[in-house]
Image: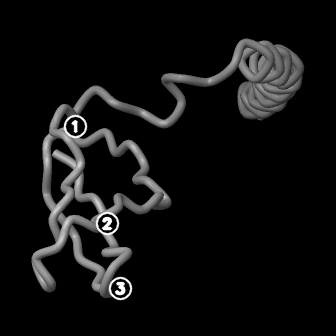
């Protein structure tokens, strides 16, 4: 349930009320007891996902996902080249040790 900010037009008193979304806005001021309460427009609140199963990347746009896939594909050949050069280096070392 959200918290709403209210202000009385008659006396200027401000307060917060914890109400259901479906509840009607308050009309009566708790300070002066007159019907001059008005619900104020607030900044709102962010949606917070708590618990397991919610990740920041779950709701990415399609363009972001395509760019991320392209980055992964571009970096894959560099990884395979470095692995092949490492294996060549180890082969030459092993052949040298056999020759000794």
Label 1 sits on residue: 21
CA neighbours of label 3 inside 10 A, class few (<14), some (14 to 19), many (20+): few
Which residue is found at the position 14% from the left and 41% from the top?
20
Which quarter of the picture shows residue 72?
Answer: top right
Q: Residue 7, image x and y in percent?
A: 34, 73
Residue 95 in view (yes/no)? no
Which quarter of the picture shows residue 28?
Answer: bottom left
Q: According to the image, what is the colour scheme of the structure?
A: one colour
Secondary structure found at label 2: strand
From the image, which quarter does the C terminus lie in?
A: top right
Secondary structure found at label 1: loop
Q: Is residue 74 left or right of residue 11?
A: right
Label 3 sits on residue: 12
Which residue is found at the position 30% from the left and 67% from the top?
6
Q: Pick the residue in front: 42 or 79.
A: 42
Residue 24 in view (yes/no)? yes
Which numbered tag is attached to residue 5?
Answer: 2
């Amino acid at each position: 349930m959200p918290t709403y900010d209210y202000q009385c037009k008659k006396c200027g008193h401000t307060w917060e009320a914890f109400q259901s979304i479906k509840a009607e806005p308050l009309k009566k001021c708790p300070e002066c007891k007159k019907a001059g309460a008005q619900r104020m427009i607030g900044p709102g609140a962010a949606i917070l996902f708590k618990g397991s199963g919610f990740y920041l990347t779950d709701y990415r746009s399609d363009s972001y996902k395509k760019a991320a896939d392209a980055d992964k594909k571009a970096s894959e050949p560099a990884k395979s080249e470095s692995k092949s050069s490492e294996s060549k280096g180890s082969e030459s070392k092993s052949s040298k040790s056999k020759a000794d």
